[in-house]
Amino acid sequence: MEKRRYTAFGRKYLLQNMPFFIVLALLFVIAWTHGEKQDVLFWISLFLFVAGCIGGLVWDKKRTTRFKCPQCGKLIRTPVVAERKGGDPIDYYCPTCDIQWQTGLREAED
């Protein structure tokens, strides 16, 4: 089995997170600044912030189960280490190409 680095997946992953993070941060600031008044803007921004956090977790799980092999295009649904602990690499193995793709991403530490 050959091992190859594929850091484009990690860069793409980060770039997809940035707009999402910016929107969530903005919603948090709006909720924080309207917290004392507890007006409609507070409740709407709080609801959207919580919904965005939950949606982000679901979206993140989907993205880590939809890796396409850069060489043959095959969809790989599970990383090499399916039950990861903090610090474990998030790599994918393509049985068609017999290549383990090293994404450079790691499971977050608890």
Image: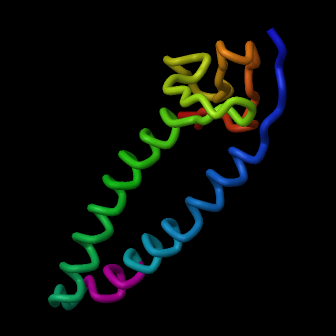
Outermost residue toward the front in this view: 72
* Residue drawn at 58 percent across, 60 percent down: 16
Residue 33 in the image: x percent, y percent? 35, 87
Q: Per the image, is 31 magenta?
A: yes
Front residue of 1/80: it is: 1
Front residue of 32/100: it is: 100
Residue 97 in the image: x percent, y percent? 73, 18
* Residue drawn at 47 percent across, 73 percent down: 25
Q: Is residue 86 above or below residue 43?
A: above
* Residue drawn at 59 percent across, 37 percent down: 108
62 relative position to 16: left or right:
left
Front residue of 65/22: it is: 65
**Which residues are the magenta region?**
29-35
92 relative position to 3: left or right:
left
64 relative position to 10: left or right:
left
Residue 47 in the image: x percent, y percent? 22, 70
Residue 52 in the image: x percent, y percent? 34, 62
Front residue of 88/61: it is: 61
**Quadrant of the image occupied by residue 84:** top right
